[in-house]
Structures are given as structure tokens and as C-alpha cells.
Image (cartoon, rainbow, N blue to C red):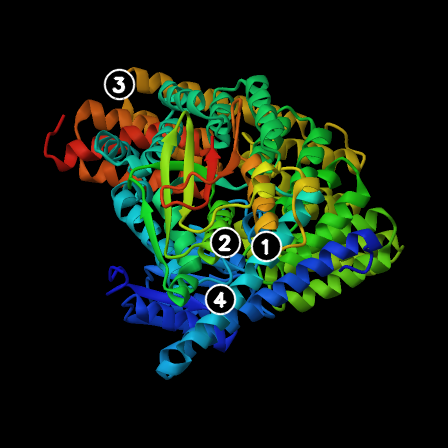
Amino acid sequence: MNAGLKEDALFPVILGATVHDIKNSLGTLLGLIQQMSLKQSAGQVDEVRQLEFEANRINHSLMQLLVMYKIDSRKFSLMEDEYAALDLINEAKAQQDRLSRLQNIEVRSECRDDLLCYCDYQQISNALGTVLNNAQRYTKNAVLISASEADGYLRFCIEDDGLGYPPHLLEADLTNPADVDWVSGNTGLGLYFVAAIAGFHKNRDKTGYVEIDNHSRLGGARFSLYLP
Amino acid sequence: MKPILAGKSILIVEDYPAMRKAIRNMLYTLDADLITEADNGENALLAMSKTSFDVVLCDYNLGAGKNGQQVLEEARLQKLIGYHCVFIIIAAEQSASMVLGAMDSKPDEYLAKPFNAQQLFARLERNLSRKTLLNSIEKEVERGNLSQAIQQCDKLLAGNHKKVRTHLLKMRAELATLVGDFDTGRGIYAEILQERDLPWARLGLGIIDFQVGDLAGAASHFEDLLRAHPLFLEGYDWLSKVYEAEDKLQEVQEVVNQAVDLSPQSILRQKKLAETADKIGNVAVAEKAYKAAVTLGKHSIYRSCSDFTNLAKLYTKTHSGDEALKTLAHMRKEFHNDPEAELRATTLEAELHQNGGDTEKAGLCLQKALLLHQQLGANTPKDLQLDIARGCFLQNQAGQAETILDGLIKTHIDDEQFLDDVRRMQSSVGLENHSEDLIQNTKRALVATNNKGVALYKQGKFKEAMALFETAIASMPDNKTIIINMLKIILHDLKASGIEEEKLLRAQALFKKARQIHIDRHKLGILQMEFSNLLRQYHEGARV
């Protein structure tokens, strides 16, 4: 069926098929790890959790890659609907559950259960998961994830008690690829991705955006995602 | 986690044993105790025919046979799953819903791989609690009891269900549209749009304009919608309906082509594109789309032998006789011992032989086709009957052709699009306006019958009016106008002279018939609303 494809049309097909294949393997891998974690001896707990965490990370990176590719080739669009903000927080927490247990970090959430949010569930929960993952890596003891209404926007906040964002990141324009520190680690890449996803969320004259600062209630970094 | 799955029957459909086991283990941690497993689509459907599941978790990619979307389509069409069933398609890709672009069978949710027990729990809890809440509405909708459904919906809207409020408003507006209460529908959609530019609300406004016959208004709503949400596929489907009603086939083709580009897996859109392109003579587009429909049909409930013969007919027109024969051979393999497929093939072969100058073989094929048609009787689809009639004209058997045409015209006299097909066929065999007299006479006779019936009804002579229509329906069994008139009379009779069990049953039978012959849902909705009001009075014992 694909015999007539030209070279430029072939790459997306190969990319799609490869991602499909890797995802299937990852799914199986994660399933096996979960089963292992039920059987293993106490001494192996950390190793199995580490294994699961790494597999999850590969999945996240793969998903980001795919989304960025689609944005680049103008094939990206949101599938928006109305969801409970608490569901999104819980989904992000569930994604990162293993890491929290691995590092013994307390992840608290603060959100009214009737707070609603209009967004692409998958993309926003992944975006929150990405930021939560980073917060968990840089915090000392605790992370607070919350949602509230703020001036016609719904605001998700992720706060930690670590050392805070470095100055170069605080000064950067997160939507500008030239400002993002691509080399040293995942933080800049993750934030660029989340800012891109936020920017796709629009209502009337309002557009979604992200903000970072070091005004965390816990004393570390604070990330805010605003959805219109 | 709450034991939300205790006592719920769950089906896992997944071809990969390790994945199946992983999902099963997750479900066990959620207290599931009634788990069934299937390793392919066929087995999944078999399981669904035996058990009414509360939850179906179905992988999209199921190996060689049906995919998850095709399993869902077949389960819905065959009514193997009820309105209470949560159907989740598990897909490797996040944007699956768009790629699959299902036209009328959407799962309750797509779940992207990989996922863990907590994520699965969150999805299941959300869907199960929503289904429980909306149960009272869905139940009435399924029974065709629209006024009760509206009552239930209003009751829930008056309660404090903030989480599903938007969803309830959408349902309420759709129900209002269905029963012809367009003001309420418009009001809800406008209120929603003030808050946020939601695509379904804009679509809803367009649908109402379409129903009241304001085609220009409808088109502008759908065009606005697609400008703001170019991936909202239903917008293309509705815009194409507007163009079709305006007889702008070129535009229909353009719009459906855009939708097909976005959702190449949607077999129904491929068929629509093929048939439209075929009608306006765009051979290249038609050929590509028919081929796609044939390929997608292999494991689909929408598989149809007419896609094969339409493709073969296209080849006949472009003088690629060999390709046509190859396509027919392929079809005979796929539809072994299927009488309709055999009849389609034989009818087309008659024409192929005729074109090749082999009049003897052509004659034999036509004879065989007429015999098969006789055996199928009323089950021969109308487009195929038209093809047979064409074959008869081509072989100078005008008598046989007239008999078939006579029946077709009488049965489908209120189907303008089909009458145009009849006219097109006759022009193709050099008989311009051949049946115009018959068409006009039949129309006049129908109008006269209707007028007479309505006059009797206005004089209060319900019995006489019904008898008149009963006679008329005997000679035009699928006539939509007559069925609607009969429904109107019987409803009025029930209101005027009291409710009797026998009349209620008669009305129910007529509604069933109306649905069978695909009377427009919105035309029927208003009558159904009246009927369900009557039923309620009857059951409450308050006889009028």
C-alpha cells in the first residue's frame, strides 16, 4: 500500500511505525517490571523501581519527540474537552508514582474537586508529569502540586523545596528555542515542551502560558501553567 | 483505591499474551473479579454475544484480523454492548482518535500505552461514574422514549452535578433538536458559545439550521467551525450534507476528500468519496477511494460487495475490461456463496460480454441475473435493481426493464436523489425522460391519496383514512410519506378517542417500520416525542 510513497512522505511512516513498536515494547517492559516488583526480595526494591523509572522516562522522551515532530510538520492539534482539574493532577501523580516512592518524596496535592479545566487531557497531564518529574529530582523532601482559578485562567502550580531554578533559566524566554539550554539536562527541554503545549490552548483572546520563579511556598522552585 | 470494579464484568481484548497478563494483573489490584480475555477481534465479538460486559478494554492493534475500532463498530451495530458499557480503546499513539477518525462509533475513551494501574483506575472511575449518572437518560433514549429522556436530563441539570454539567447540556440540546424543539437547542448552544468557542456547540447550531432548511445558514456555521477547528471531522461530514442537499456534487467531493485526508482509515468516508467522485465522473479519485473501501472493508462490518462492483463498473467505463474481471474474481473469493454478490457480478458480466461483442454470453448472464433477482425478491438493493434494468434495456428486453422500473419508482417515489439515479440510468441507454410520465403520474396519485386521507382525517374519519393508507402502502411498501401520515393519524386518533392497547401496538409497529426504511431521525423525533407522552399518560393510568 505504501509503495507509491515519496521519500519525504516515507519518513513519517517509518517514524510512526517505529514509535508504535517501541511503545509496545515499553508497555510489555513496564508490565513485566510491575510483576517483578511484586515478587522480588526486599533488597531489590530500589533497583526495580529505578528500572521502572527509566522505562517511564524513555516513554516520556519518546512522546515529547513525537509531539514536537508533529508541531514542526504542522500536524499537531489538541483534543480538548472538559475535565476535573483534580483528575489531571492525579494522572500526573500516577505517572510519577514510582519515582516518588523511589526517592521517598512526599507529593501533596491541593485542589477543589469541582474545579474544571478545558484542555487536552493527555497533553496536559503529560506536561504536568514532565514538570513533576523534574521537581522530584531537584527537591529535598516534598513537592506540592495544586490547581486554582486565577484571573480567568486555570492555574496549575508545582512547587518544591529544592535550590530553585538557576538564574539563566529564570531569565530565559521559554518559548524561544534559542534561549533554551539544550545540552545540560532535561529541565530546559521539558519546559520548552510544556510552554509549547500551553501555547496551543486558546479561548477567545486568551492563550495558555507558563511561568517559572523561585517563590515556592516550600522555599524552592515554582512552576505555573496557566490555561485559558 | 476504591473497589470500583468489584462485581463488574470486564473483557480484555489483546493479541499479545504478556500484555494481556499485565492488564489482568492491574485489574486484579482494582478488585476486579469477573475478567474474560480474547486474543483477537472475532473472539472478542463472540464473548460479547454471550456476556453483556460493563467494561471492554480493547487494544487497537490486534494483529491480522479486525482492529479495535472495527470490533467497536461491529459490537455497536450488532447491539452486543449496552449503553452502560464503558468501551476503552488502548492505542500506541496519543492522537489515535484523529487518525482513526471514526465516523459514528467512538469509544468512551482512548488510553495511550504504556499506562499503569493508577492511570487505568482514574479513567475507569471517571467513565463508570459518568455512565451511572447518565444511565437514566440513555435508557430512555435507547427505548425511543424521548420525552422521558428529556425529563431525566432536566432533572439532572437541576441537581448539583457540576462535573458533568457541560455534558448534560450537550445531551439536552441534542435531544431538543431531535424532537424539533429548535429554540431550546439554539438557546443552549448560544449560551455555551458565549463562554467558550466549543466546536460541538457550533456544529449543533449548524445542524438546527440544516433541519429547518436554512442551508446557507448551516453552511456558514460549518465553515466557521472548520476554520477554527480544522480537525473536527464531523464538521466536514455535515458540510458535505449541505452541499448534497444543494446538489453541488463537486463541493461534496472536495469536502469529503479533505475529511478522508485527515482520517484515511474511515471506511464510510472513503465510500462516500468514491460514490460522489464516481457520479461526477472523476475516475481517478473514485478508483482510489473504492480501492481503499475494498481494503478497509476486509474485516469491517461495513464491508460491502457493491464497493467491488462499483470499482469494476468504473473499469468497464474506462475500457479496462481485464481489471474489471480481476476485481469481480477478487469479490467472488471474498463473498463466497453470497447471493447479492453473485447477482452484482453476473449483472456486470452481462454488460462486459455485451461490450466485447459476445451477445450470446451476455444473454445467458442476463437470464441468470433475472433469475437470481427473482429469488432475492425485495432484498435486491435498489441500485442493483437499477443496474439489472439497465442490462435489460441494453439487451432489448424492454418489458423486463419496465417491470423492474415500475416497482422501483412506486416504492421510491419520494426519494428525489434516487429518482435522479433512475433518470441518469435512462439517459445512459439513450432513453432520456423515458419514465417521466410514470414518475409524474405516481407522484400525482400519491398526492391524491394523501390529500384524500388527510381530508378524511380532518372530518374525523380516522378509520376510513387509515384504511385508505393501508391500501396505498400495499402497493408502495416503503413509502415514507404514507408511513408518516399513518403515524400522524394514529397518534391523533389515540389522543382524540382514547388509548387502546391495540392502537398502541399498531403505532409501535409503524415506528419500527419507519426506522427500518430510514425516515429522517428528526422528522420522526417529533412524532416519537408525542408518542412517548401518550405512553406515559397510559402507564400513569390517566386516560385522556
Q: Quadrant of residue B53?
A: bottom left
Q: Chain of mark 2?
A: A
**Mark 2 — residue?**
A134
Residue B466 at x, y percent in the picture = 33, 29
**Mark 3 — residue?**
B460
Q: Is residue B503 above or below residue B49?
A: above
Q: Is residue B179 left or right of residue B403?
A: left
- Quarter of the image with the N terminus of chain A in it: bottom right
Q: Which mark is residue A186?
A: 1
Residue B534 at x, y percent in the picture = 21, 31
Look at discs 2 and 4 and give the one toward the viewer: 2
Residue B299 at x, y percent in the picture = 58, 63
Q: CA distance from mark 4 to mark 1?
A: 15 Å
Is any part of residue B14 visible from this angle?
A: no
**SS under mark 1:** helix
Marks 2 and 4 belong to one chain:
yes
Q: Residue at x 56, y 39 (%)?
A: A170
B43 and B109: which is toward the camera = B109
Q: CA distance from mark 1 to mark 3?
A: 81 Å
Would you say the residues marked 2 and 3 are in contact, meaning their CB atoms lie under 8 Å apart?
no
Q: Chain of mark 1?
A: A
**SS under mark 4:** helix
B277 and B117: which is toward the camera = B117
